[in-house]
Amino acid sequence: MKILFAAAEVDPFSKVGGLADVAASLPRRLLEMGHDVRIVAPCHRAGLTAHAASPVHTRYTVAGPAGEREVDVALVEGHGGVPVHLVGDSHYFGDREIYGEQDDLLRYQFFCRAIVEMLKGGEWAPDILHLNDWHTAPLAFALRNLAWGNPALRGVASVFTIHNLRYRGPDEFNDFLSQAIYYSDIVTTVSPSYAREILTQEYGEGLEALLQLRGNAVVGILNGVNYDIFNPRTDGQVRHPYDLSALEDRQRNRASLRRELKLAETAGPVLGMVTRLTEQKGIDLVLQAVPAFLASDAQLVVLGEGDRWIKEELTRLQEAHPGHIRLAARYDEGMAQRIYAGSDMFLMPSRYEPCGLGQIIAMRYGAIPIGRRTGGLGDTILDLDEHPEGGTGFLFDEFSSFGLESAFERATRAFREPETWLRLQSNAMSRDYSWRASATHYVEAYIAALRARGIVPME
């Protein structure tokens, strides 16, 4: 099967969040399964060197609001040898920010138009166009609309993945995401629970009726992580490598993390957070629960960028409790890996969480997650009380500081019982949330999309 994966960011050529990881890892697994898969993404700042060094460049003329522009599409090699088409245009992309520019709507419409020109003019035609979030959503309608007059587009089916329903673009009068929900052959979300949740008024963001209209065409497929990259035995950012057979070595990473962040040596657990500093992530609950953490001699380490008021409050708490609270208000991939490897517990008390990769990575590194039972958190964390032998973490239901504190208290009791804690870590590190199973489910979605278009897939 030929698959073109379209996304606004893809590691290692551009990265802000989890989409870049998905855009790199899922196609890689599909390629390993024998599919002919390629990625197309804008050429942002971090990809300029690779773009310039590529020996293969193709130019396309793309129409836009200000007239025609010529784009330079370079073919480069992504993770695992996946071909990546980097769409180069110095006006819309290049040295500008990936997100947050005033003309984001025009920039990503232009990107979509460039993809259409590639499809119309290229020798390689995909069976599946896999779209991701609002940045590529206009292509779902364009594919349907343009297929009437272009034979190259008639055999292409579309799959649209909603990574977070709340992010619908910068213009409330141009909701491309809604178009993609309606016109895509199959709509996927990033966890089974989130697929059910967005059909309700509480989580549907006003689109629940439209999503309900699609019925069985809305499918939840859990995100995975690349276990070759996220591996505590081979991760170059981990000070003291370890694996399931040498968990005693993991404790040295906790000591290293404390030294790096100038935290005191205590008998309590280290609580880690690698997150966007927004209310969606439940940071307000964490702030309210700080007295409970301090009472248990726990230390809180937070890495992330986001809302000013959250940074200011965490900074105030850091100044009041310098030995127990530390904020690193930035994006730092290396420190993120050291937090996963050095923290005892990992906090994800989200208001909603479509999938979440943090809890999956934390379990891979032996940090026990404490999360709210929502979206992918409920799909991936097995609560110890509900699974005494197979538990991997702790869940709470009510979005409140009381709920978080109750789960933390249960985790602390387990932390003080070495045999129980070792079992939790062993269970967590043994779980397989790689792309193996998830990629198979995506292939099933691709086949369903082709059938929806009346195309007989080559299974």
Image: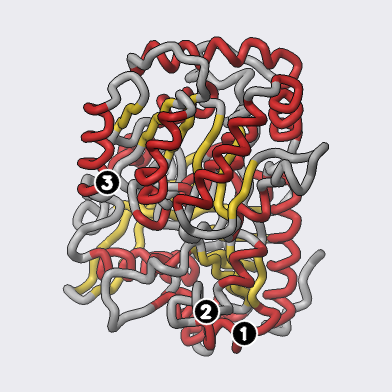
The residue that appears at 62% across and 49% down in the rendered structure is 395
* Circle 1 crowding by C-alpha within 10 Å: few under 14, some 14–19, many from 20: some
The residue under label 1 is: 214
Q: CA distance from mark 2 to mark 3?
A: 34 Å
Q: Is residue 247 left or right of residue 65?
A: right
Dot 2 or dot 1: first in sequence order is 2
Secondary structure of the residue carrying tag 1 is helix
Q: Quadrant of the C terminus?
A: bottom right
Q: Nearer the viewer, residue 215 or 262?
A: 262
Secondary structure of the residue carrying tag 3 is helix
The residue under label 2 is: 181
Q: Is residue 304 left or right of residue 420?
A: left
- Disc 2 residue type (three-letter): Ile
Q: Is residue 354 left or right of residue 66?
A: right
- Check if mark 2's residue and mark 3's residue have beta carbons within 8 Å: no
The residue under label 3 is: 310
Q: Position of residue 68 (x, y in %)?
A: 23, 71
Q: Position of residue 429 (x, y in %)?
A: 70, 31
Q: Position of residue 275 (x, y in %)?
A: 41, 43
- Check if mark 2's residue and mark 1's residue have beta carbons within 8 Å: yes
Q: Nearer the viewer, residue 107 or 175?
A: 175
Question: Is 394 placed above or below 353 here?
Answer: above
The residue that appears at 68% across and 75% down in the rendered structure is 449
**Mark whose residue sits in front, 3 or 1:** 3
Q: CA distance from mark 3 to mark 1?
A: 38 Å
- Disc 1 residue type (three-letter): Arg
Q: How is the image coloured?
A: secondary structure
* Circle 3 crowding by C-alpha within 10 Å: few under 14, some 14–19, many from 20: some
State the image quarter where residue 103 is shown: bottom left
Q: Nearer the viewer, residue 228 or 87?
A: 228
